[in-house]
Amino acid sequence: MKKKAELTHLDKIYWPDEHITKGELLEYYSNMAPYILPYLKNRPLSLRRQPNGIKDAGFFQKDAGEHVPDWVKTHEILAESTGKIVNYIICNDLETLLYVANLGSIEMNPWNSTISKLDYPDYIVMDIDPSEKNTFDDVVDVALTIKQILDQIGIEGFCKTSGSRGLHVYIPFNKKYTFDEAKDFAEILATMVTDYLPNLTTLERSLSKRKKNHIYVDFLQNRTAQTLASAYSARPKPGATVSTPLEWSEVKHGLSPKEFTIKNVLKRVEEKGDLFKGVLGKGVDMHKALQKLEALHES
């Protein structure tokens, strides 16, 4: 069966301030396919469609719908919240990536697990979510505190920009543990971060209840069906920013997520390689890590 995504309205303006078109977004994904597809492969994909560009609030779509081409791989999953079957798109190749982007899906939001083992995530995510009062230097401080804790217990973490105002730190789990176990581990780690930075961080999710200058260390992303923008995903934000993997040496005061856009990320990756590939590598021994965390907490 021939796979060919029909690309339409390429001249439509998606980023009006920068005059960046839908065609330029599709060109970005076409060029970046070898780098982004490993983080989408065999993962249910939630679509946030903004067919009129970033000024359009758009809508979320999980089900592939009736008009999905026969060559697009899909996978049915029972949604626990509704009791209904959702037929998710599975993006394993360039043409599917272009098909999804052509729908107006500026960003790619995959699950943390694959269809081969849906209840066992490949990684956990520490989502550093600032309030309006925080600077990006504050966000950097939280990320470096997470790294400090991980270094003390002998675990490697991988950091990327969210493409917006936050940072994400990933820890490889390699399908060894359930989502419940992953969330519990992430909560312990998040609690330790708030112990280290009590005047800057919180576990309070609600912005209205949160102190105005406190950053939420979000461990609840580590649940079934939760999604975040993939590594190398474009974001519907000013500047056409990209969620970009970082070297830890780059995570320092003065860093700005605005540095990384669909205009320059390809060149960066060609020069530095894929800084995120370890996320899909050998997972940590969570039980040993928990023992070390406990010892660290007591010291």
Image: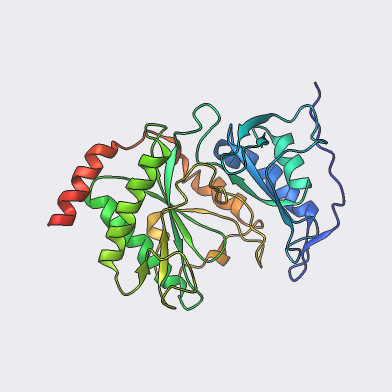
| Picture residue at 22% right of the left edge, 49% below the top | 293
Q: x, y (%) of residue 102?
A: 78, 46
Q: x, y (%) of residue 142?
A: 36, 64
Question: Quadrant of the image for the N terminus?
Answer: top right
Q: x, y (%) of residue 16?
A: 77, 68
Q: Nearer the viewer, residue 298 or 241?
A: 298
Q: Is residue 51 above or below residue 110?
A: below
Q: x, y (%) of residue 89?
A: 68, 36
Q: Is residue 114 above or below residue 101?
A: above
Q: Nearer the viewer, residue 246 or 48?
A: 48
Evaluate whether residue 90 shows in this view. no
| Picture residue at 44% right of the left edge, 47% below the top | 222
Spot the residue most to the left.
Answer: 299
Q: How is the image coloured?
A: rainbow
The number of callouts visible is 0
Evaluate whether residue 126 shows in this view. yes
Task: Locate residue 285: give its quadrant.
Answer: top left
Give the side of residue 81 with respect to residue 57, left or right.
left
Spot the residue most to the top.
Answer: 1
| Picture residue at 46% right of the left edge, 71% below the top | 136
Give the side of residue 33 with respect to residue 231, left or right.
right
Q: Nearer the viewer, residue 299 or 140?
A: 299
| Picture residue at 77% right of the left edge, 38% below the top | 65
Task: Locate residue 31: give its quadrant.
Answer: top right
Q: Nearer the viewer, residue 296 or 276?
A: 296
